[in-house]
Image (tube, rainbow, N blue to C red):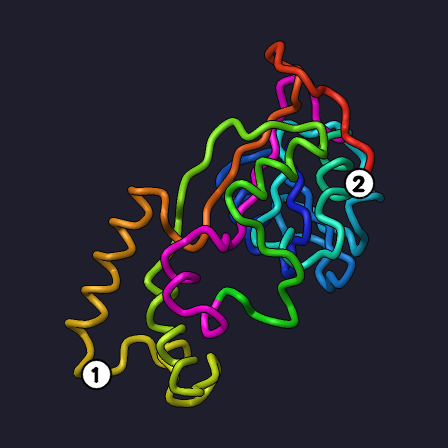
């Protein structure tokens, strides 16, 4: 069983259902969809209303939108079946793009993003929730460059001239875009991208200390 927390319109839930996973679930306080034909259910609620157990709980670019990510992870941990895992995908300040662009970094996304962890911060956050980082994989895209460059020119992401609105239109910047794409691949490989996916496991499961959440 899979639960996607902060599922929005349910894009990931639908993809999982189409991939053959049995009845994936999604929760989001602002959800307007209730599910999809052929499987996949969505509840307009927060994670505190979800009923486990789940083999996998995902935060697909949603944890950075909550004021208390530790509470979310503590609840997710309580919902895990034996051997279950949590996957968090979110931006990180421990990346070349943030160092390069500062307050023009596209993933700051203020005021929608409330908490953006560093890599060390994610390890600390997981520990305080009774979890440990089992693995991490960078999955940044070239958007970290081209969108941040737009912000440097005071061009909004949804400006009619933005690449977000017309990504395939003819441009004299294709060579530059190719360079950003190649740079992104290098940064991901070296662990210096601006977003990543963390796999979290309950601490203590493998004999490591700290099996219980730390008090806030």
User: Horizontal and vertical percent for residue 207?
Assistant: 62, 10
Residue positioned 70% across, 20% down in the render: 210
Question: To which quarter of the image does residue 122 belong?
Answer: top right
Which residue, as the protein is rendered here, is positioned at the far bottom?
Answer: 160
Q: Quadrant of the N terminus?
A: top right
Give the secondary structure at mark 1: loop
* 192 horizontally vs 67: left or right: left
Q: Quadrant of residue 25?
A: top right
Q: Is residue 61 above or below residue 200?
A: below
Q: Which residue is mark 2?
A: 50
Q: Is residue 123 above or below residue 116?
A: above
Distance from the alpha carbon under mark 2 to that under mark 1:
47 Å
Q: Who is closer to the viewer here, 210 or 83?
A: 210
Residue behind mark 1 = 170
Q: Residues within 10 Å of mark 1 (few under 14, many from 20)?
A: few
Residue at 73% from the left image edge and 64% from the top image edge: 32
SS class, disc 2: loop
Residue lying at 21% horizontally and 83% vertically, measured from the top left: 170
* Residue at figure coordinates x 77%, y 45% from the top left: 47
Quadrant location, the C terminus: top right
* Residue 85 falls within the magenta-colored stretch: yes
The image position of residue 88, as x and y in percent, is 57, 43
Can you give x and y, in whole percent of width and height, for residue 199 in the image?
A: 53, 33
Q: Residue 100 has which mark?
A: none
Look at the image and say whether residue 191 sits in the magenta stretch.
Answer: no
The boundaries of the magenta stretch are 79-106
Locate residue 23: give its quadrant.
top right
């Amino acid at each position: 069983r899979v639960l996607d927390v902060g599922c929005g319109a349910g894009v990931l839930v639908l993809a999982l259902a189409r991939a053959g996973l049995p009845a994936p679930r999604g929760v989001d306080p602002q959800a307007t969809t209730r599910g999809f034909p052929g499987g996949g259910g969505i509840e307009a609620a927060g994670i505190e209303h979800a009923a486990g157990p789940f083999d996998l709980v995902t935060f697909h670019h949603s944890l950075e939108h909550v004021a208390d990510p530790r509470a979310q992870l503590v609840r997710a941990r309580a919902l895990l079946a034996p051997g279950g895992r949590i996957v968090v995908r979110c931006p990180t300040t421990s990346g070349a793009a943030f160092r390069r662009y500062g307050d023009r970094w596209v993933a700051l996304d203020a005021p929608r993003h409330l908490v953006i962890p560093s890599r060390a911060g994610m390890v600390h956050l997981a520990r305080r929730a009774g979890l440990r980082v089992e693995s991490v994989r960078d999955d940044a895209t070239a958007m970290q460059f081209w969108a941040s460059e737009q912000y440097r020119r005071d061009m909004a992401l949804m400006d009619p001239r933005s690449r977000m609105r017309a990504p395939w239109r003819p441009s004299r910047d294709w060579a530059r875009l190719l360079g950003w794409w190649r740079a992104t691949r290098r940064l991901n490989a070296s662990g210096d991208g601006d977003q990543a996916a963390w796999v979290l496991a309950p601490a203590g499961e493998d004999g490591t200390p700290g099996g219980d959440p730390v008090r806030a």
